[in-house]
Image: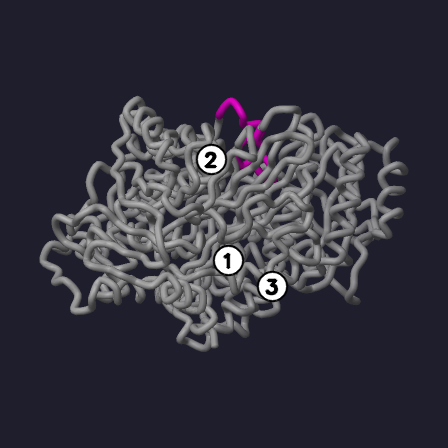
Amino acid sequence: MSSRSKEELAELALTEQEYRRIIDLLDREPNDLELGIFSALWSEHCGYKHSKPLLRLLPSSGPRVLSELGQENAGAVDIGDGLAVVFKIESHNHPSAVEPLQGAATGVGGIVRDILAMGARPIALLNSLRFGPLDDPNNRHLFNGVVGGISWYGNCIGVPDVGGEIAFSNSYSGNPLVNALCVGLVESERLVSATVGDQGNLLILTGSATGRDGIHGASTLASRTFESDEEMRPTVQVGNPFLEKVLIEACLEAAASGHLVGLQDLGAAGLSGSTIEAADRGQRGIRIDVGRVHRREDAMSPYEVMLSESQERMLLVVKPESKDKITAILEKWDLPWVVLGESEEGRRARIFESGVPVADLPVQALTEPMLYRLEGVPSREAEEAAAYPLHSLPLPNSSPTQVLLNLLESPNIASRESVYRQYDTQVQTNTVLTPGAADAALIRIKGTNKGLALATDGNGRYCWLDPFVGGAIAVAEASRNVSCVGAEPVALTDCLNFGNPERPEIYHQLEQGIRGMAEACRVLNLPVVSGNVSLYNETRGDAIFPTPIVGALGLTQNVDRRAGTGFRQPGHLVVLLGASTIDASAEALAGSEYLEGCHNLIAGRPSIDLDLEAKVQALCRHAISEGLLASAHDCSDGGLAVAIAESCILGGLGFTANFNIEGRWDAALFGETQSRIVISLPPQNLPRLQALANDANVPIVNLGKVSGDTITLPGPIKLPLQDAASIWQNALPNALS
C-alpha cells in the first residue's frame, strides 16, 4: 500500500484508512513534513474526529452570542454598553500527567492566548481539577505539581485566579484532569478574528524563539493513550510567564491600533495549526518560509519548526502598509518578530525552507479530517450499578454526627483554602467574591455597575451511572452556582473529558453526555459558545469516569446585589428552595459522596427535573435582586446537611433545625437530590419570598434558624461549630502531609 508501517502511523495517531485518504487527496504519498502536518491537524485534539458530529447537537446561538462555535479561538458574548466577554475552557490533561508543573502552567498560558487572540484582555482564570486519592504518593506529586504550575504561571502574568473546583476519585489515578478557563473583556467593535484576510496580507510571527519542546505535544499526545511518562516527556511544552505578560500587552496594543487584520495564537500543532487554520477562516492560501523563524536551537528541521509547540508565540496578520506600525509596537515591547510569509489565492499551504519548497498541501483537506459516527453501547458494569436496589442498603453503623464529620473531612468536600491561597485572587482589583466565599466567583466590570459570575462544575460519578443525566446535571449545577450569587447565566463553555471513543461504551458515554447537556441547555436557554474535547484519557487500559466540565458565565446588572455562602446574622431564617419536604427516599443517595464514602459504593441512577431547576434558579436570582436574601448555597456533594454545615462554617454561626425526617435519615441529610438551594434571610422578608415562590410555582420549606455556635439537625446531630470548622478546614492539608 505505502512505505509507512502501521506502527509508524500509530505513533502519529493516524490509522491506515486515514493514510489512504491522505494519499487520495494529494494523489501521491506525503513527505515526512506533510504527513506530520496532517497528523497534527487530523488529530483528535485538533480535528475533533469523533466528537464534531456530536457537538452539533449543542445549542450555540442566542441574542448575546457574537461568535460562531468552533470558528474562533473562544466564544464572545455581548454584555451591553459596547462590551463583550470572551471565554473558553480547555484541557491540558495528558501533558500534566507527564510533567505536572509545566503541563498545568502551559495549560494556563495556552488558554490565556486563546482569549488574547480575540483582542480581549484576560481578566480572570478558573480551573477544574481531578486527581486520584491523595494517599497515593504519585497522586500527591501530580496534585502539588499542577497546583504549583497554575499558581506560578497565573500569578506571574497578573491575571487573578478566582475560582474552580477539585475532585478526587480512583478513576483519575495517574490520569489527572487539568481544565483551565480564562475570561477576557473587550469592546465589541474591537473583537479580532483569527484569519489571514485578503490576498497579500503579511503573516508576522512574534514572541518566544522556537525550540524542540512540545513537538506533537497537545495534538498527538492528547489523541492516543500512553503507557510511559518517560517516552512522552519531551512532548510537554515549557512555559515563560514573564514573556507571556509582555506578549499580552503588545498584542492588545496592536489590536487597539486598528491595524490588525487577524490574530492567532500558536497552540496545538504550533505553526502548522495557527497558519493553516487562519488561512481556512480567510478562505485563502498561504506561502510561508520557515527559514525565517527565530530559533533557540541549532539545526532544526522544517518538520521540527512547523510542529513545535513552543509557548508564548503569536501570529499577527497585517496589510503590507501597516507592517511598520505593528512592528514598531512589537519592538517597543522588546519582542522579536519576523515576516513569515503572506496570504495568497489558491487555498494551498505552500511551505519553504530558505526558498526551497518543502511542503505543498490543500488547506481545506487539512482542516476537514475524516469524521467518525459510531454506535455506542452502555457499559454493563455501569448499568448494573445504576440498577442497584438502594432501598435495600442498610443504615450505617456510624452516628449521623460522625457521618457528617466524615463527609466534611472528605477531600471532595473539605475546604480548598490551602489551594486557592496560593493563587493571586485580587490582582486587577476587580474580584468581589473570592474563592470559597460563594458558589461562584464574582468580578466587577470597572466603569459600570455590572458584574460577571463564573463557575465550573461536573460530576464523574453521575455521568458514569447515567451519562445523559450526568451531562444535564453538569449544566444545571454550573448555572445554579452562578444563580446563587445573583447573576443570570448567559452562556456556557465546556471541556469534555472521556476515555477512548473507539470503545463502544466510551462512545456511548460521550454521545449521551452531550445529549444530556444539550437538553439542559435548551430548557435553561443557554448557548454553548466555546469549548474543548479531551479524549483518550486512559492509563493502562483503564478509562477515567466520563467527566464533562461546564463553565458558566453569569451577568448581573447590579454587583452590589449579591449573595455569598455563609450565614450572616443570628435569627435569620433558613429556607430550602426547590422542595416542599425533605427527600428521605433511598433514590436520593444515587451517585452521592455519602454512598461512596460510607459504603464504598457508586450506585443508583441520578435524576433531575430541568423545568423545576429553571424555576428554582430564577426564583433565587429574583430574591437576591430584591435584596431579600442574606446567603444562598446550592445543595450538591454531601447533600443538605453538608450545605448547612458549610454555610455555618463560612459565616461563623450555628444553626438550629425545626424540621423532622420521615424516612431514611441518611437520605434526608446526605442525599443529593438536585435543584435545591439553601438560603437565609431576615424573618421580615419571608412573606415576600413566599409570594415570589407561589408566583413562580416553586416549593419551599422552612428548615430552621441561624443561632448559637452549634450545628443542630434531626438525626440527631448536635455538632459544635468549632469542631466542624476544624475538620473541614484542615482535611486537605492533612491529606497532603
Q: Would you call the spot at circle 1 few (<14 residues within 10 Å), some (14-19), or many (20 or more)?
A: many
**Quick check: can you spot residue 26?**
no
Question: Does the magenta segment cover residue 76?
Answer: yes
Residue identified by numbered label 2: 486
Q: Which mark is residue 89?
A: none
Residue under the point 59% across and 56% down: 107
The vertical placement of 187 against 403, above or below, is above
The vertical placement of 439 against 10, above or below, is above
Disc 2, SS: loop
Upstream in sequence: badge 2 or badge 3: 3
| Between marks 2 and 1 in the image, the one whose residue lies nearer the viewer | 2
The amino acid at mark 3 is: Gly
Residue identified by numbered label 3: 149
Name the dominant secondary structure of the magenta segment: loop
Q: Residues in magenta?
A: 62-77
> Viewed as shown, does residue 78 lie left or right of 625?
right
Q: Would you call the spot at circle 2 few (<14 residues within 10 Å), some (14-19), or many (20 or more)?
A: many
The amino acid at mark 2 is: Gly
* Residue lying farthest to the left in this orientation: 392
Question: Does the magenta segment cover residue 272?
Answer: no
Upstream in sequence: badge 1 or badge 3: 3
* Depth order, front residue of 684/168: 684
Residue under the point 59% across and 49% down: 125
| Between marks 2 and 3 in the image, the one whose residue lies nearer the viewer | 2
Residue identified by numbered label 1: 178
Colour mapping used in the image:
one colour
Instruction: Where is residue 136? Give x, y as percent.
Output: 41, 76
**Quick check: can you spot residue 540?**
yes
Upstream in sequence: badge 2 or badge 1: 1
Between the residue at mark 2 and the residue at mark 1, the CA separation in whole angstroms equals 28 Å
Instruction: Where is residue 628? Give x, y as percent.
Output: 42, 32
